[in-house]
Amino acid sequence: MAEAVIFVLMAVGALAGALTVVIARNPVYSAIGLLATLFSVAVLYVAQLAHAVAAVQVIVYAGAVMTLFLFVIMLIGVDKSEDRDERLPYQRPLTLAIGGLIVIVAATLTLAGFDWVPAATATSADATNGTVERIARPMFTDWVLAFEATALLLTIAAAGAIALAHYRRREG
Amino acid sequence: MVDPGWYMALAAALFVIGAMGLLIRRNALVMFMCIELMLNAVNLTLIAAGRALNDINGQVAVFFILVVAAAEVVVGLAIIVSIFRLMSTASVDELSELKG
């Protein structure tokens, strides 16, 4: 019951934040909407016992990534109003129609009790209790190659960002 | 316990909102935020499915997606900033330099 209440509250928060991202004219409002969604999703992670992932979500996403976003928004300037003319004639109506259709189908299926996870077993809270130890064991055994690859990827990304920041257009 | 289907439906709604924003908006920064929204929707799906299937690996996968998303944000924002330096705009409609 408690989980249902948390789910409804956080689902409303996440959807409101997501709609703000898309609708807001000012990019700062979009960033704050995204922040609301990220926090709501983090709470939903906790409700599903993914504690470590929720902590990382708040630290990495809501902390580092959103700070980076806000810095870039400040750098680029928020006073410039976005050009709102749509140059592709059917882009918006088609997007809204297809998106609305998908949402309606998903909502109908869920309300009708559609089996989203067919092989679902009786959940034991113990098996998926996502503490740091529980996550670290598969990460450093089964997934160790992926772990090394992401480490390499992060290094390359940092080097690439520095290279891009140093880029100057050649004179003449 | 909330049925995993509800988490799936919420994730689907978040993903669709993100995809619609990506198609409708023309500001490169906001489009980027929409991509983050879609990544988060997928993460929520993985966590819900992992719990329904009694498998901790769902959470490990989310961990890796978070890392890759962080790397993607770093490079993407650097690209947006350097485009802004060259063109003084962040609107993707204005970026038609390759057009003959």
Image (cartoon, coloured by chain):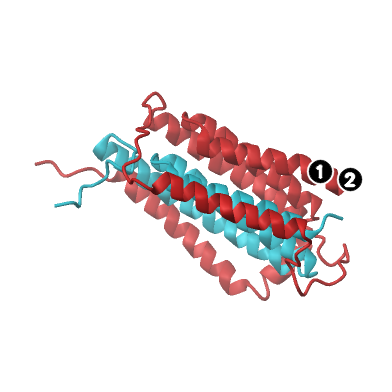
Chain colours: A red, B cyan
Seen at 38% across and 45% down, the residue is B78
Q: Pointer 1: residues within 10 angstroms few (<14), some, or many (20+)?
A: some
Horizontally, is A1 left or right of B69 in the view? right
Q: Determine whether the residue tagged by mark 2 lies in a helix, strand or loop.
A: helix
Q: Tell me the tag on residue A6.
A: 1
Question: Could you tell me which quadrant the C terminus of chain A lies in?
Answer: top left
Q: Determine whether the residue tagged by mark 1 lies in a helix, strand or loop.
A: helix
**From this viewpoint, is residue A14 visible?**
yes
Residue sitting farthest toward the left: A172
Q: CA distance from mark 2 to mark 1?
A: 6 Å
Horizontally, is B32 left or right of A107 in the view? left
Q: Chain of mark 1?
A: A
Find residue A128 and report its horizontal and vertical position in percent: 81, 64
Find residue A87 and report its horizontal and vertical position in percent: 31, 42
Between residue B65 and residue A18, name the one nearer to us.
Answer: A18
Q: For residue A78, which quarter of the picture?
A: top left
Q: Tell me the tag on residue A2.
A: 2
Seen at 84% across and 72% down, the residue is A121
Q: Tell me the tag on residue B68.
A: none
Above/below status of B36 relative to A145: above
Type of the residue with mark 2 = Ala
Seen at 58% across and 33% down, the residue is A32
Find residue B49 and report its horizontal and vertical position in percent: 73, 65
Type of the residue with mark 1 = Ile
Q: For residue B55, which quarter of the picture?
A: bottom right
Tell whether label 1 touches label 2 (CB within 8 Å).
yes
Find residue B96 and report its horizontal and vertical position in percent: 23, 47
Q: Chain of mark 2?
A: A
Q: Pointer 2: residues within 10 angstroms few (<14), some, or many (20+)?
A: few
Seen at 69% across and 47% down, the residue is A41
